[in-house]
């Protein structure tokens, strides 16, 4: 019997500070046992439990793409006990990962469609995974137009800034990067404004072949949803990824439920249509 | 005490109608013999649901914490002392309350009653000094005084300390009661006997925290056992963690505990939780001449410093 | 399957025989109540009890259970910080005297720990190592502490005093002996190992059991109504106006969840001892605010009414909808008898079942 509570041992291969306030770092992990990488075969939108012996575990969305081989990447915000400890760890240190866990963005449905990605703050991790996945030469032809609206408080708080620039330069993806304020960056040449405002201006019109993937802080989601309604997006065409407190990650420990669904196992990805039928306990 | 029922309803209805309070916190009849359920009454026509008898042992002050309405509360002696403590500790203002004072003759320990009969109790009815216990096959009458909760049987503050209106004349407080006999019995043990006594006492604890949650003093937004940064206590069934919980909780109640017995009454495993708090109550009496909740003018002894505080017990 | 009737005098001998093949657990009275414990040599299970104060769920789902271990010693490079499985004892165990309600309860819990997607090896291996020998609630002699008791509502909760689900054998305590009915191969093996010399006219004994069963079922006169729960709209029940009033008395202790045979929620905690440590599975409760508190400080169930509602919605609606296997309650009545403030699941269940949202 496979033990779903036993983490795979991994080594930290690289650590990159992502934001100017140093509260977000991207950790690149390599599996100590190469066969574990095969077992950790995942799809964009899933998460893993980062496991530190003696400290505990923390559920984090997978930031790398299934098309990137030889490692997995997680971008972690420093918040509690486990994440603070992780931020203090070094390249070469050993820890564990469990997963992949949860469902993923519905790639079978999304194939052949226009995709609008709307992200805010540090909830951009599985969206990065999704973009890298879709832009891969093997996959790009499977999708029609790809639009990305991504915002942060300031230019220095945007994740994956090098990649954002590279995507800006491409013609097979429409990037709409925005910040709440660019006052501290005179060279800022992209949008200024909150994500809902930019969505209203830049998002393509609703269409039966157009799906929006929305991931961000509650306040962003609260104000983006009416915009998408106004643009005419059907609620089963709006895909969201939720967070709730989790421990086991496999639908057993009982804390992350919203109604009869577990965010860790039945989610974290739900359509707005599904969420409308569930209690708002998230 | 069942004779108080009409008066309680009359006062409650009146103060609700007059707008003196928004709600009444009291008891309604429970679904099992010897059980009443704390409840809130919001409309004058619902005061008919209120009950009062010797099965109202849960301390209602627990239900006042962080409420915003103007509250009428039915309060026996110990409850009023906890109200005093809440006022002194700035948890509530006297003006927010209308205290319906109940001179109390003691609450029944349902486990004691159960031990008096062989088969399951179906119904218990109460008279002034006796209770009638009906089982599937039998019916017997017992003296209430033999069946009181232990804290009630040694209580010397049965009358409310503060109140806006009484439901009956004040009663005579019992005299010549040795309130600390149980503590003295433990004090006279050897260190090893004490250790074994307390190990046995908490051996069945499941850390459900019913004792803490039933306690009107345990209103900390986050209890020390729940803190995660730092985590003071392990969450498992390790004995040292269970001990730490009980010891620290008791010490946190020192000089504040009114021996209302809610903790013991709430424990699903029948642990005599008061064995911890009673010792600290005795110490407060002996060292500081202090009894919790008797005055609005002074803070509990562990809460303030006086130049003449005794020091000879500090090692 | 085998049905035997044994003299009560032969009982102790059989129990001792059984201890050669199994670790044997049974009800035992200490202090004022019965709990399940491992029986020592010469100790027989005490079958004169209403029900144990706690359900025997801790036999395979301990309140705290070490599941993984790790080394934190940086000098041991190959092991340091690598989490490993703890080797555990899954040798055969027999639990004698478990009530039918508890046994059925664990079959309701199983799909949580053993499903298509994930299997919790700790729960499954421990559960599967146990042979469950049930004790029917047949003691209907009212002059004693006869079962069933007045707060039992098993017959309307999908269970009953002679219910066989989850049991490997059922003992029926009669005036002149124990009738033991094997229900599974595991149960039959148990009977063989006990080597009980027995009268075994199976047809007669089965008829005897059925009569006693009927009598016992008639003794249960407390009921819940559950027939309409499945058809209720989840969000209607969730937003119903009765929760505020019903939750008032609740003090949010975890008593109901800890004594419940069907409650399974847990926490995972690391505890360190110097250079090593253990990762624990640990009972937790939806009654506690910390259960759902996010790292950000946000709490989706921050209020008492939300937590109270979660417990009843989980048992009586979410479970019903998710598994289509009845309610997540067997009517053992422990939560009613042990609630410090008399919250009664029977009342809440009936309110939910009859609830109609205002038009």
Image: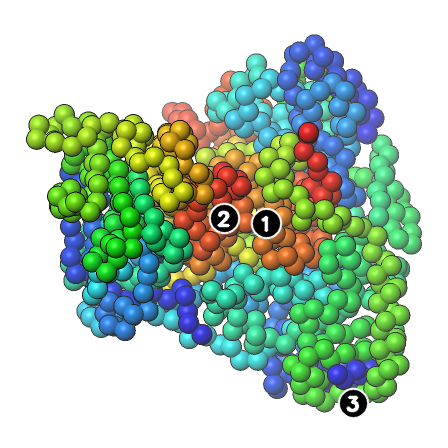
Q: Secondary structure at mark 1?
A: helix
Residue C26's x, y, as percent?
Answer: 66, 71
Residue lying furthest left in this view?
A187
- Near-viewer residue (B104 or C330): C330
Q: Which residue is mark 2?
A: A257
Q: Secondary structure at mark 3?
A: loop
Q: Which residue is mark 3?
A: C197
Horizontally, is C312 left or right of C146 in the view? left
Chain letter belonging to callout 2: A
Q: Which residue is mark 1?
A: C318
Task: Please give the name of the residue rendered at 48% of the width and 28% of the height, measured from the top-left corner.
Answer: B300
Q: Secondary structure at mark 2?
A: strand
Judge the density around disc 1: few (<14), some (14-19), many (≥20) Cα neighbours within 10 Å: many
- Using the numbered discs, state the Cα–Cα distance from disc 1 to disc 2 in whole angstroms: 10 Å
- Near-viewer residue (B165 or C63): C63
Quarter holding the N terminus of chain C is bottom right
């Amino acid at each position: 019997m496979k033990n779903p509570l036993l983490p795979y041992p991994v080594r930290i291969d690289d650590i990159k500070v992502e934001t100017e306030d140093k509260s977000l770092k991207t950790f690149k992990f390599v599996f100590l046992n190469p066969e574990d990488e095969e077992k950790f075969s995942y799809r964009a939108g899933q998460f893993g439990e980062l496991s530190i012996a003696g400290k505990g575990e923390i559920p984090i969305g997978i930031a790398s793409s299934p098309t990137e081989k030889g490692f997995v990447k997680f971008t972690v915000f420093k918040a509690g006990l486990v994440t603070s400890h992780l931020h203090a760890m070094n390249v070469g240190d050993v820890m564990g990962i469990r997963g992949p866990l949860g469902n993923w963005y519905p790639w079978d449905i999304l194939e052949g469609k226009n995709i609008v990605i709307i992200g805010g703050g540090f909830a951009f991790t599985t969206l990065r995974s999704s973009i890298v996945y879709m832009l891969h030469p093997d996959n790009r032809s499977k999708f029609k137009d790809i639009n990305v609206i991504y915002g942060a408080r300031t230019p220095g708080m945007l994740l994956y800034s090098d990649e954002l620039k590279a995507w800006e330069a491409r013609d097979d993806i429409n990037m709409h990067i925005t910040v709440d304020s660019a006052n501290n960056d005179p060279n800022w040449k992209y949008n200024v404004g909150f994500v809902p405002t930019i969505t209203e201006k830049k998002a393509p019109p609703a269409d039966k072949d157009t799906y929006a993937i929305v991931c961000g802080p509650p306040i962003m989601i609260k104000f983006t949803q009416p915009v998408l309604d106004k643009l005419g997006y059907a609620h089963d065409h709006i895909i969201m990824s939720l967070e709730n407190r989790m421990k086991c990650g496999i639908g057993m420990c009982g804390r992350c439920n919203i109604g009869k669904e577990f965010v860790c196992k039945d989610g974290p990805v739900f359509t707005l249509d599904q969420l409308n039928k569930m209690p708002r306990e998230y | 005490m069942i004779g108080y029922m009409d008066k309680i309803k009359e006062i409650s209805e009146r103060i609700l109608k007059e707008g003196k309070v928004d709600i009444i916190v009291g008891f309604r009849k429970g679904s099992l013999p010897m059980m009443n359920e704390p409840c809130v009454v919001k409309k004058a026509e619902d005061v008919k649901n209120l009950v009062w008898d010797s099965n109202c042992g849960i301390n209602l002050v627990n239900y006042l914490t962080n409420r915003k309405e103007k509250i009428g509360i039915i309060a026996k002696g110990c409850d009023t002392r906890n109200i005093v403590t809440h006022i002194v500790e700035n948890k509530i203002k006297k003006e927010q309350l209308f205290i319906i004072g109940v001179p109390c003759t003691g609450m029944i320990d349902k486990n004691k009653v159960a031990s008096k009969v062989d088969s399951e109790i179906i119904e218990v009815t109460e008279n002034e000094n006796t209770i009638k216990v009906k089982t599937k096959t039998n019916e017997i009458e017992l003296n209430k005084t033999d069946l009181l909760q232990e804290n009630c049987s040694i209580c010397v503050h049965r009358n409310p300390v503060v109140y806006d209106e009484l439901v009956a004349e004040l009663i005579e407080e019992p005299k010549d009661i040795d309130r600390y006999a149980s503590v003295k019995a433990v004090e006279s043990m050897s260190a090893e006997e004490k250790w074994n006594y307390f190990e046995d006492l908490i051996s069945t604890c499941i850390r459900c925290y019913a004792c803490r949650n039933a306690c009107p003093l345990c209103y900390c937004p986050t209890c020390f056992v729940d803190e995660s940064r730092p985590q003071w206590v392990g969450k498992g069934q390790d004995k040292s963690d269970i001990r730490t919980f009980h010891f620290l909780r008791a010490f946190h109640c020192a000089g504040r505990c009114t021996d209302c017995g809610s903790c013991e009454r709430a424990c699903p495993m029948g642990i005599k939780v008061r064995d911890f708090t009673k010792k600290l109550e005795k110490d407060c009496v002996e060292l500081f001449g202090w009894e919790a909740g008797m005055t609005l003018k002074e803070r509990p002894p562990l809460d303030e410093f006086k130049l003449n505080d005794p020091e000879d017990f500090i090692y | 399957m085998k049905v035997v009737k044994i003299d009560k005098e032969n009982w102790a001998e059989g129990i001792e025989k059984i201890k050669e093949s199994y670790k044997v657990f049974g009800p035992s009275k200490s202090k004022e109540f019965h709990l399940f414990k491992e029986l020592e040599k010469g100790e027989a299970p005490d079958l004169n009890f209403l029900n144990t104060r706690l359900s025997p769920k801790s036999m395979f789902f301990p309140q705290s259970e070490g599941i993984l271990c790790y080394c934190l010693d940086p000098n041991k490079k190959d092991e340091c910080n690598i989490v490993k499985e703890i080797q555990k004892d899954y040798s055969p165990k027999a639990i004698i005297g478990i009530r039918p309600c508890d046994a059925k309860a664990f079959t309701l819990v199983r799909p949580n720990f053993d499903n298509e997607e994930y299997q919790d090896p700790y729960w499954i291996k421990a559960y599967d190592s146990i042979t469950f020998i049930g004790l029917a609630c047949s003691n209907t002699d009212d002059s004693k502490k006869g079962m069933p008791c007045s707060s039992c509502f098993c017959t309307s909760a999908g269970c009953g005093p002679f219910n066989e689900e989850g049991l490997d054998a059922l003992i029926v305590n009669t005036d002149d002996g124990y009738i033991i009915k094997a229900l599974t191969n595991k149960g039959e093996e148990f009977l063989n190992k006990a080597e009980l010399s027995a009268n075994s006219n199976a047809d007669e004994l089965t008829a005897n059991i059925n009569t006693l069963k009927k009598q016992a079922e008639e003794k249960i006169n407390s009921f819940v109504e559950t027939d309409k729960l499945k058809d209720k709209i989840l969000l209607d029940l969730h937003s119903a106006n009765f929760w505020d009033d019903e939750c008032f008395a609740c003090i949010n202790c975890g008593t109901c969840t800890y004594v419940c045979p069907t409650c399974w929620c847990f926490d995972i905690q690391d505890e360190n001892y110097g250079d090593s440590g253990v990762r624990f599975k640990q009972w937790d409760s939806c009654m506690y605010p910390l259960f759902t508190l996010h790292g950000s400080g946000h709490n989706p169930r921050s209020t008492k009414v939300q937590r109270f509602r979660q417990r009843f919605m989980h048992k009586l609606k979410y479970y019903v909808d998710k598994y289509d296997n009845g309610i997540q309650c067997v009517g053992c009545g422990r939560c009613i008898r042990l609630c410090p403030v008399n919250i009664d699941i029977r009342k809440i269940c009936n309110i939910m079942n009859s609830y109609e949202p205002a038009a």
